[in-house]
Image (cartoon, rainbow, N blue to C red):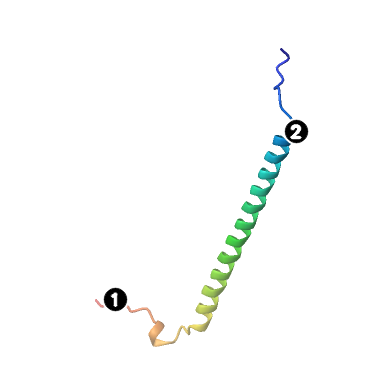
Amino acid sequence: MTGEEISGPAGPKAIRLLYFVGAGFICVAAINKWRELERKSLQEQQHGLKEQSPHDPANAVPKAID
């Protein structure tokens, strides 16, 4: 024996390669979508903070009473 693996026709290997490439494509698309959602969320938070005035009494932090 030469230690090489006996393989069948090239069809199953090509199908496995297509599955692997397809799974990679789906994962990359999902990661990009997640990053886009995180970026939008961060922009909305920053936009919300800009709209709030630090001198507005409704946004003031109450101080502890001694």
Determine whether 15 is above or below 7 in the image: below
Q: Which residue is mark 1?
A: 64
Secondary structure under the numbered disc 2 in the rendered image: helix
User: Residue at coordinates 51% horizontally, 83% vertically from top-left?
Assistant: 51
Type of amino acid at the residue the image marks with label 2: Ala
Q: Position of residue 7 (x, y in %)?
A: 71, 26
Determine whether 39 is above or below 16 in the image: below
User: Residue at coordinates 64% horizontally, 48% vertically from top-left?
Assistant: 23
Type of amino acid at the residue the image marks with label 1: Ala
Say left or right for 11 vs 37: right
Say left or right for 15 vs 31: right
Mark 1 vs 2: CB contact within 8 A: no
Q: Position of residue 6 (x, y in %)?
A: 71, 22
Q: Which residue is mark 2?
A: 10
Secondary structure under the numbered disc 1 in the rendered image: loop
Q: Nearer the viewer, residue 25 or 12?
A: 12
Q: Position of residue 33 (x, y in %)?
A: 61, 62
Camera-nearest label, 1 or 2:
2
Q: Residues within 10 Å of mark 1 (few under 14, many from 20)?
A: few
Image quarter of residue 44: bottom right
Q: Position of residue 2 (x, y in %)?
A: 73, 14
Q: Nearer the viewer, residue 35 or 64?
A: 35
Quadrant where the image shows the C terminus = bottom left
Q: CA distance from mark 1 to mark 2?
A: 75 Å
Farthest residue to the bottom: give it.
Answer: 56
User: Residue at coordinates 70% horizontally, 35% vertically from top-left?
Assistant: 12
Quadrant where the image shows the N terminus = top right
